[in-house]
Image: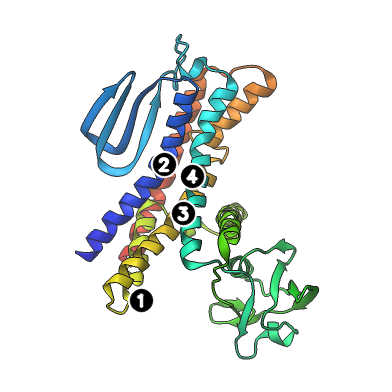
Amino acid sequence: MNTFINVIIALLVFGAIIFFHEFGHFLLAKKNGIYVNEFAVGMGPTLFSFTKKETKYSLKLIPMGGYCMMLGEEEEVADEHSFSAKSVWARLSVVLAGPIFNFILAFILSVVLIAVCGYDAPVIGKFSENSPAKEAGLMEGDMITDYNGHRIYNFREVLVYMQFNQSGKDISLTVDRDGEELDFTFSPEKAENGYLMGIYSNGRTKDGIWNTLKYSALELRYQIKTTILSLEYLIGGKLGLKNLSGPVGIVSMMSDTINEAKDSANGDTSVAVINVILNIVNFCILLSANLGVMNLLPIPALDGGRTVFLLFEAIFRKKIPTDKEAFVNTIGFMLLIGLMIVVMFQDVLKIMH
């Protein structure tokens, strides 16, 4: 029963993030005078609907996302209220609104999370036994500002770079020690789970409204940055398709996270509820930022692919016929569906094992 409830929660969260993305398209379409034929919450058969002015508002059976269907989106329509009839900049604003709304949602949720839990400044709290970082001269209280040439703003960035850098090569750290900038270079320690520096976080800190807003923006930056890094490693062959997760894998991971949050409460119901809510918020930040980045990729059928067509039109002042663009987007969509099927099959195999 608990697993079923967890899956429902995960589906609702996943759907809400996609819905917020589509809501961005919807608002900018309305702002630019584009008729929205249907704005739907969920997918599948319609449970309830009503029409107001030119738009049909629908509630669907499956609580997974939604869609914003605009007049003239897939074909040329001789109507001043159609998507195809609007200026390139109006259409571009509508297309980009989805990813931008995902980033806005991730930032708002980051404010909530950091206001409650605090932020993880990149300050060294303690060292492991025989820590190579300590032997190199680093000290507790040092704030890491640079890792191998990468600017660091929170402690998890250090962990991410360590995770992606499993070659055993020397590590260069720059730290702020009482206002003095110091540089250190040392070799990480080989461990069972990879290479380690032997350092631990100083924990999370709560420090006023300004730092809450500052580190909320940096949280969004962190999520965007880790998504881009993952894509770079995937394209570079350092990560394989086995490292990808689709909706099935995401729902499974979220269910596991909810169970862990409950277990960490040690039977205290109120603490369990708070832990579950905070973990869900954290997952929403991750998913929303990821969805925003992935949709900006220059791939047909995604917002990024449509942006490429629109930028081409803006630069060369030549509009690509809507039907041809729709054809390219259809091919891209079919390829994406094929990839999703492969990833879903892979996710199912992981769960079964």
Are circles 3 and 1 on residues that touch, CB within 8 Å?
no
Query: Which quadrant holds residue 132?
Result: bottom right
Q: Is residue 196 left or right of residue 262?
A: right
Residue in view at x 55 percent, y 66 percent? 119
Residue that numbered label 4 is attached to = 102
Residue that numbered label 3 is attached to = 109
In primary-sequence order, the first of circles 3 and 2 is: 2
Residue 11 position in % (x across, y down): 31, 51
Query: Which quadrant holds residue 47?
Result: top left
Instruction: Find the distance from the CA under tag 3 to the CA under tag 1.
Output: 22 Å
Query: Which quadrant holds residue 40?
Result: top left
* Mark 4: amino acid: Asn
Are circles 4 and 2 on residues that touch, CB within 8 Å?
yes
Badge 3 local density, few (<14 within 10 Å), some, or many (20+)? many
Residue 335 position in % (x across, y down): 45, 38
Residue 79 position in % (x across, y down): 45, 10
Q: Which mark is residue 264?
A: 1
